[in-house]
Image (cartoon, rainbow, N blue to C red):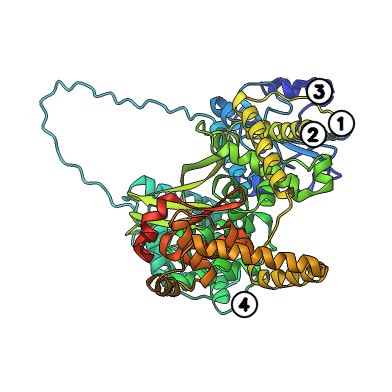
Amino acid sequence: MDKFAKIAEKSGYHLCLEHSFYIICNRQKDGGESMRLSELAKYVQKKYGLGVDFITSGEVSMAALIVPGAETAFALLIKQGEKEGLDLHCGSIAAFLAKQPGFGAPICIKDRGWLGVDLTAPELNDRFLLKTLDTAYQAGRPAVKRREHMFYVADRNDESPYEDAAIPERGSFVKRSDHRRVSHHGSDVIFSSKSPVRGRDDTPPAISRMLESYDYQLPVATRREANFYYQGMMMADYEDNFSYSGQIRFRRPVYHDLSVKELRDYFSWRSRVRQGDFAPAKSGFLYLLTSEIVCQIGIKDPLAGLRQLQLLQEHYQGQDQLTIWDLKHLIQGYLVYYGIKLSPEEEEQEFAEEIKRAEPYETLLADAEGDSRVYQALLTLAKSKPGANPLLKEDPEKYASLVADVWKEIKSSPKQLAQQLVGEKSVFPMHLFADAAFYSPHPIEAATYQVGQAVTYRCKDGKWTSEVYWPAVRQHKLLPDLLHEIDRRSRLALGRGRKMKERPLPAALQEAIEAGIKTYLREEAEREKPKIHLNLASLAKIRGDAAETRESLLTEEERQLEAQEAEAEQEAAASQQAAPSQECKESFGQFDLTPEEGYVLQQLMAGKSVSGYVKQHHLLTEVLADSINEKLFDEIGDSVIEIAGTEPELVEDYRDDLSDLFGSEE
């Protein structure tokens, strides 16, 4: 272990000794890393050409990643039991990146410039992880020390005139960028004075012309991609039938990186693929072909290119995990750049990960319906499991309604509590074809591509950005505490379940929780009140049945007495109340009012009592008033009769309107 410690000390960083192991680059013979760690190791090997060697001490396996020529590591792969992690050196931005989902404090290395990544975290964004890893790799590359070149011009004291000297013609020359091809393949490539880049006599003329066309005068920033595009257009329809058993040393090559044999082998493989024979692809061949497709080299139209990319994804998805990742995001970039609209089902398939990641944000930040959806979205972002709340166990829908009422209070807060808890949409610069050699002589300058509500891609002045939901800085801390406090305070309000320990929350959130619980209790009390539903169509039958029952219970003396009282009341009413005029009868008929309803309305308009008339005719005051109000509602727009105790009264605000309709009795 002392030897391990010296090696770790040499790397320039301090380790957490409580982990009881050190870092060392040595071969792990028994293969202790898990599938997730294996995928990351393969990515590092293929993209950066770095060997990933593990050492095991007990249950812990570790491997340090060092850029060639550097003195310190830029990353550390860690596996301890079932946990897998990664420490990355990100310098001054480490503190910012550590707040992102799946990122956090460094696992082993005690340095403020380092951060840790939990590879088992479900919220970890693989694409963001690989970009951060690439940033750490680039930052770890050693600085190149350039020599200062100086020329000394000697003084000339003699007066001898300058004479031109003939420069002999060189028989052959090699351009600087061709040294790699010559040194790698030796005598396999010959350069002559007639053709600066040329192969053996059996080199196909098309390949010779393509190699000779490389333009060294193009701007350095786009020279590699631009030459690839123009050379690819020259070779768009070229076919070959050649076999080369050697391996390609580059994972992401362009034509200029390959020898003649490698080029012929590639074009032969491409010919077979175009004919439907998806033979195994060597490293770099898929990169070349997908780069041709996104550049529209040998492609009829963008839709044809999309179909070819999907075929490659289908037939080569089992090659390795990195190939699947590259093709997936390449297809997404292709759809966005060429503006190919998909059906909702196809869009959900191609952007499944992006749509799924945005779903809880849309549910919480938009006006989504469904209390259970709101509750599940909070659980998803909080990475929490449903607790043991008594109400939740008894009726999950009611508990979801309670949580949803609290969330409504949070959303309605003017302090943007929802954004502080969950996050909001943010705009990030992006490179659509980071996984391909892409160049276009006429690039798109302005465009917009919408993927549901999940992502918005925009191009302005040739620069692409993506607008996506981004988690709040304190989301991972505040959301679990919020759900805990809803659980705790709801138990207190309902008087059920054991008491829970309080967790501190901002005062605004505490107020929102209390207001939401009160809203739920008030709504629940309203729901529990018995509801009385009157069927007006059945009232006539009810009145008839009641009259028959009453009649059957009366004795003969009671009937005679009642008849005498009715006769007396009728005579009194006749002396006090006049019959409706003919004009009123005609007006009442226009609104389907019965004679009884018309009479009652006329008497109320005249300011007279109708209680005797109602009793005499065995009418129900409430039913009579409801019937009149309903028939006049379309004309007046409101109820014209209201019940004060047991006596119906006319609403004074509508007396003039009724007088205009029916006329008034003077």
Mark-to-mark CA distance, 2 and 4: 66 Å
Q: Is residue 211 visible?
A: no
| Total residue callouts | 4
Q: Is residue 207 above or below residue 68?
A: below
Task: Give the residue pinned by disc 1.
Answer: 498
Q: CA distance from mark 2 to mark 1?
A: 8 Å
- Quarter of the image for the N terminus: give it: top right
Of badges 4 and 1, nearer the viewer stands: 1
Give me the residue at 44% from left, 75% from top.
589
Query: Which badge, 3 or 4, comes first in the chain's sequence?
Result: 3
Q: Nearer the viewer, residue 34 or 532?
A: 532
For this view, does 622 lie left or right of residue 163? right
Left or right: where 621 falls relative to 579: right
Q: Residue at x 55, y 49 (%)?
A: 367
Q: Tell which of 550 and 237 is nearer to you.
A: 550
Residue depicted at x 34% and y 54%:
446
Tell me residue 185's x, y (percent): 55, 56
Q: Tell me which amino acid carries mark 1.
A: Arg
Q: Which mark is residue 285?
A: none
Q: Earlier in the sequence, mark 2 or mark 1?
A: 2
Q: Quick one: SS at disc 1?
A: loop
Q: Position of residue 493 (x, y in %)?
A: 76, 32
**Lower sequence index among marks 4 and 1:** 4
| Disc 2 to disc 1: CB gap under 8 Å | yes
Choose top left, top right, bottom left or bottom right for residue 103: top right
Residue located beneath label 2 in the image: 491
Q: Nearer the viewer, mark 2 or mark 4?
A: 2
Q: Circle 3 is placed at which residue position? A: 3
| Residue under pointer 4 | 277
Task: Find the distance from the CA under tag 2 to the CA under tag 3.
Answer: 58 Å
**Mark nearer the viewer, 3 or 4:** 4
